[in-house]
Image (cartoon, rainbow, N blue to C red):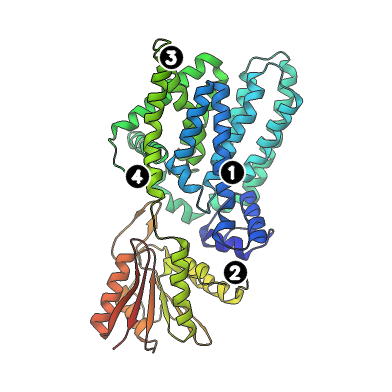
Amino acid sequence: MLALNVALRGFGALARPLQLEQSAPILFLWLSRVATAAGGVNEYALRLLPLLAGLATIPLVARVAGSLVSPRAAVLAAVLASVSPLTFEFSAVFKQYSTDAFVVALLLAVALPCCRTAAPTRGAWLRFGLATVVAPLLSAPSIFVSGPSLVALLLAPRDARGVVLRRATGIAAAWLLIVGVNWAVFQRATMHSAFMQHYWEQSFLLPPFRDAFQHLRARTGFLLQAMLTGSNVRYPTSLRYVFTALIVIGLVRLGRRHGAWAVVLTAAPFVLLWTAAANRAYPLVDRTCLFLAPLIVLLLVAGVESVSDGLSARWSPAAFATVGGLLALPGAIDAGYHWRPQVSATLMRSSLSRVSLAVDRGEPVYVFALDTPRWIYYTTDWSHPDTARVRRLLAIAESTGPNSGNAPPRTRPLSARDGDAFVFRDGRRVELIGLSTGVEILDQFRTRYSPDPGWIEEEVDRIRALPAARQWIVSMTCLDCATLLTDGLVDVGGGKIVRLVDTIWFRVDEYVPR
């Protein structure tokens, strides 16, 4: 969905609200547009910025840990950042989350010379000011770190406090101006989107206090699991408490060694995030909280350092290496699962291209509403795109509901004419876009697991109304609904279903009517 926006829009149009309820920072969109202009609309160009951001985060985190903790902590921080399952995943996905982590790591790296030095150089101030002002345009959650970094500057020991105050005030004023413009021009529509508020409903910290606290504890546990152990191996829940204890110990160590400014710099972003979540301004979801990865890694290695330093000089290095290795092991194991052969974009493209060629021959295709953006993206020749077809199908996708067919259950029975507008004909090509199933997907769960009453019957009638010796059904989201649909076709109209592709998340069925 995000790729379609970048592929179809110029730089000016990307500054307007995106289609299909998508959102991303304006600089992320513009840099992605540059990548596709240079390398074409393909997975390599689209994933270039997230990949570079994920790679660049590693040395930045190591630099921060080496500066605040120790040289050996820098090594461990680099290892943890390298094998973090969440960072690993979103460094290969066309979304902005790995860029969020990079921007936060960069902010920490440029803030430290200004905080640790009694008289920072002009170059240090310039780097900090430039990074702070540009950050909101490249990462929305960077404001949770930029603000505390400005406060940390004022709390750090100084030789010439008046000079520091003037420079910090100037940077703060420029930062507030950019944040205000960014919100008013680029992010306001997303913040005020009724669908996005509904979509993230379960990710906010809502009253009463007891429920909000329990929710915060659960979400924090899931975040630590996603960031440090992954989901491919089942580890005991108690491991989350070990991570939390090390983070708290690390925070105490940084405070004792460096003072209040270090506590504000590393702990205030968490408090601001929780406050935003309590005010429905930012969701607590693992991917949207990936920007915390550099801070979590920093506090973890500080905690390991503190625990190992409690031992004698003889045993401290061995203890540090052992505990650090145990921390990195789950992420390394999870990374091994990512390298296993899986269904790739190449298989999806080849399978859907085969179906698209069949559609060119006059064989209709039925595409589930939720899967229309994928169908559009993978069946378009982006070197010479048929933009009229793409825009028409995209308009149909939007009319089926938010995110393309991601609509709530219907409050009225389906009508025989509901799907009349959801078909695209171009010569012999017939592309039938499905009606929304009523199986709404919010955040990371479904609101229900069965389609609306009458949905199967209506879609069976729509497919059977298209005369052809062979028809195709494409499903990449609601595979259980696809099974109900194909069973309905066979039960009502006879014929047979031949499965072209059948994986855990992608399916193509060939329907041969009787």
Disc nearer the start of the sequence (3/4):
4
Where does the image place residue 152, in percent across and percent down from the top left?
Answer: 60, 23
Q: CA separation, marks 4 and 1? A: 26 Å
Helix, strand or loop under label 3: helix
Contact check, label 3 and label 4, Cβ < 8 Å: no
Which residue is label 1 attached to? 139
> Is 190 displayed left or right of 333 in the figure?
right
Which residue is label 4 attached to? 231
Disc nearer the start of the sequence (3/2):
3
Along the line of sight, the residue nearer the viewer: 50 or 212: 50
Residue furthest top in the image: 312
Q: CA separation, marks 3 and 4? A: 32 Å
Q: Residues within 10 Å of mark 3 (few under 14, many from 20)?
A: some
Q: CA separation, marks 2 and 1? A: 28 Å
Amino acid residing under circle 1: Ser
Where does the image place residue 383, in percent across and percent down from the top left?
Answer: 62, 70
